[in-house]
Image: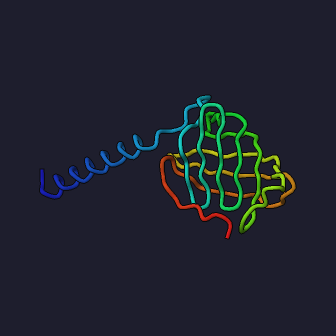
Amino acid sequence: MSQMGKAAKCIMGIIGMVLMNANQAAPPATVGQPITGRWEGVGIALLLTPTGGKAVLGCASGTISGPLLPDRHGQFRAAGAMETGGPGPQLADVAPVFKEVAYSGRIVAGTMTLELRVTGERAVRRFSLLAGSHHRIVRCL
């Protein structure tokens, strides 16, 4: 075997090991099994349990009322509620206002794409999150 052939074989072996490790670091979503753990992206963090979860955003926080159960395409849907805050101190004698929110998304290759549709808001909030990653969430400024 030529030196060029040996080098190519070595490089292919390294690429294979990297790809195997990448797949182990971010296992695919399992059909019907709840998505769990900490997922973070720019401006959002999710803490998911087998029964639901919590969402923290820059100027809002919310709950997810049930498990995120992926289908065979990695897609999921869940309902929940969200409280929107504002900059500065929040008044203690003003009751928080919660709005219904629909969470939907998909997990592909260890990346979650998430859409939030909040009742009464026209805009759809879109995020990209990774399992176990850490991002700083800047609260209402």
- Residue 51 lies in quadrant: top right
Q: Position of residue 16 (x, y in %)?
A: 31, 46
Is 71 in front, or is 10? 71
Instruction: State left or right for residue 141 relative to residue 47.
Output: right
Q: Which residue lies furthest to the right in this view?
A: 120
As displayed, is residue 7 above or below residue 107? below
Q: Which residue lies furthest to the top in this view?
A: 32
Residue at horizontal 39 percent and vertical 46 percent from the top: 22
- Residue 21 lies in quadrant: top left
As displayed, is residue 61 above or below residue 87? above
Q: Where is residue 107 in the image (x, y as percent from the top left)?
A: 58, 44
Q: Where is residue 96 in the image (x, y as percent from the top left)?
A: 81, 52
Residue at horizontal 73 percent and vertical 37 percent from the top: 65
Instruction: State left or right for residue 73 relative to residue 117.
Output: left
Instruction: State left or right for residue 115 relative to residue 14.
Output: right
Residue at horizontal 16 percent and vertical 52 percent from the top: 6
